[in-house]
Amino acid sequence: MRRVLTVAAITFGTVFVLSIVVFGRSRTDALEPASTAGSFTAHPEPDVAGDTMAGRRIALADLRGKPVVVNFFAHWCQPCKEEAGQIAQTAADYRGRIHMLSIARDSTRSGVQAFAAKYGMTWPILWDGSDDLSRAFKVPGQPVTFIIDANGRIFFFDDTQTTEKRIASTLNRLVSS
């Protein structure tokens, strides 16, 4: 009996792991992560607009002319908290040469306001309470960072906790061109 249970457990485990692998590979709508940035193909940004936490409407297309760093976050997300200081430092280092835009998802308004104050987020934060912006960008979770070039093409994508160094390596190419 013990042998039958062991064989059944191993069979179930194998089928379960294979199902996860097959499902993960079948998600063709996902973008490539920054770790494969060399093979990442720039493509047009989604045609989206959203309301800031202060109620001002911002369309992504209105920000063309300078690169745009778009960072999706949630106020409770630990990796988001860990990268927030580096995002803020990037905003300071490139002030006037880029646009910064954060998008709050899966959060409370009060949580987002506290998060922004704690991490010095002085740039616009769009409220994505309905997940419309997240769906338009095909965001799988948070944190996620995009860099859009001055012509409106997504040039960089990172679906992990990003770093100032990773963002800077892309921005340096975009702001000097």
Image (cartoon, rainbow, N blue to C red):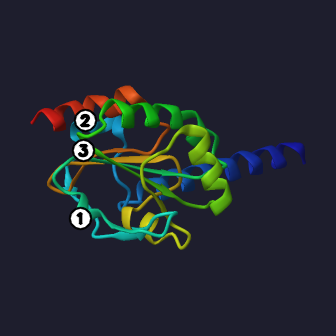
Q: Residues within 10 Å of mark 2 (few under 14, many from 20)?
A: many
Whole-percent x, y for residue 123 in the image: 42, 49
Give residue 30's position: percent from left, percent from top. 38, 57
**Residue topped by disc 1:** 61
The dot on residue 40 is 3
Residue on which the image places disc 2: 171
Residue 96 image offset from top left, x and y in percent: 26, 40
Q: Quadrant of the C terminus?
A: top left
Name which residue type carries label 1.
Ala
Give the side of residue 48 with respect to residue 124, left or right. Answer: left
What is the quadrant of residue 132 in the picture?
Answer: bottom left
Give the left or right position of residue 48, taking residue 153 as reference: right
Q: Which mark sits nearer the N-terminus, 2 or 1?
A: 1
Residue drawn where x is 67% and y is 54% of the image: 111
Tell me the kind of residue under disc 3.
Phe
- Residue 79 seen in the current view: no
First in residue order: circle 1 vs circle 3: 3
Amino acid on which the number 2 mark rests in the picture: Leu
Closer to us: mark 2 or mark 3? 2
Circle 2/circle 3 CB separation < 8 Å: no
As measured in the structure, the alpha-carbon distance from the residue carrying label 1 to the one carrying label 3 is 22 Å
Q: CA distance from mark 2 to mark 3?
A: 15 Å
Crowd class of label 3 (few under 14; some 14 to 19; many from 20; radius 10 Å): some
Is tag 2's residue or tag 3's residue first in the polypeptide sequence? 3
Q: Secondary structure at mark 3?
A: loop
